[in-house]
Amino acid sequence: MLKKVKDGIEKVLPMSLGSLALFAVVIYLIIIVGKTVMANYAANGETDKDEAKLAQMEADIAYMEDQNNYYQTQSYKEKEARAKLGYKSTGESVLSLPIDTEEEKIQDSGNLEPTITIPNYRLWWEYFTKKKE
């Protein structure tokens, strides 16, 4: 009876049952390897992102250490004492200038409204077509 079933299946399929089983195993292995390769690719992408993030953090740490070292120098302390406390070095004279009022700031800001109301293309046209005297 099994022989009849086997012969019926072999008539429908172009290969024997052993070949069909081997083919199924090969397809299964290809699928497993493909999934593994895709998982490995994704893990490498995440690793690259993590390495870039680590490099950025190391650069930030180095920058902060440099800033910390600068803040501990004497030149920084002198600069801040001059700016915030008004200190001066020996042999140095300090100039004190008055603070600008709002009116002076407006005067220094330049023309707020344009005085030329003729379009620019018209001015160029007149420049090139004007008769020279």
Image: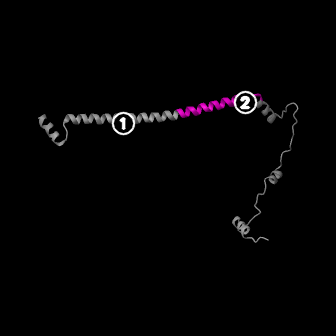
Identify which residue is drawn at 64% across, 30% down.
Answer: 62
Q: Which quadrant is the N terminus positioned in?
A: top left
In magenta segment, residue 57: yes
Examine the image and state in which quarter residue 56 appears: top right
Image position of 46 (left or right of 130): left
Q: Nearer the viewer, mark 1 or mark 2?
A: 1
Q: Is residue 74 above or below residue 129?
A: above
Circle number at residue 65: none
Tell me which amino acid carries mark 1: Gly
- How crowded pointer 1 is (Cα within 10 Å; few <14, some 14-19, many 20+) is rated as few
Examine the image and state in which quarter residue 19 appears: top left
Image position of 51 (left or right of 77): left
Q: Which quadrant is the C terminus positioned in?
A: bottom right
Residue 16 at x, y percent in the picture: 18, 37
Q: Secondary structure at mark 1?
A: helix
Residue 81 at x, y percent in the picture: 80, 32
Range shown magenta: 51-74
Tell me which amino acid carries mark 2: Tyr
- How crowded pointer 2 is (Cα within 10 Å; few <14, some 14-19, many 20+) is rated as few
N-terminal label among 1 and 2 = 1
Question: Magenta residues: mostly which secondary structure?
Answer: helix
Residue 54 at x, y percent in the picture: 56, 31
Examine the image and state in which quarter residue 73 appears: top right
Residue to which mark 1 is pinned: 34
Circle number at residue 71: 2
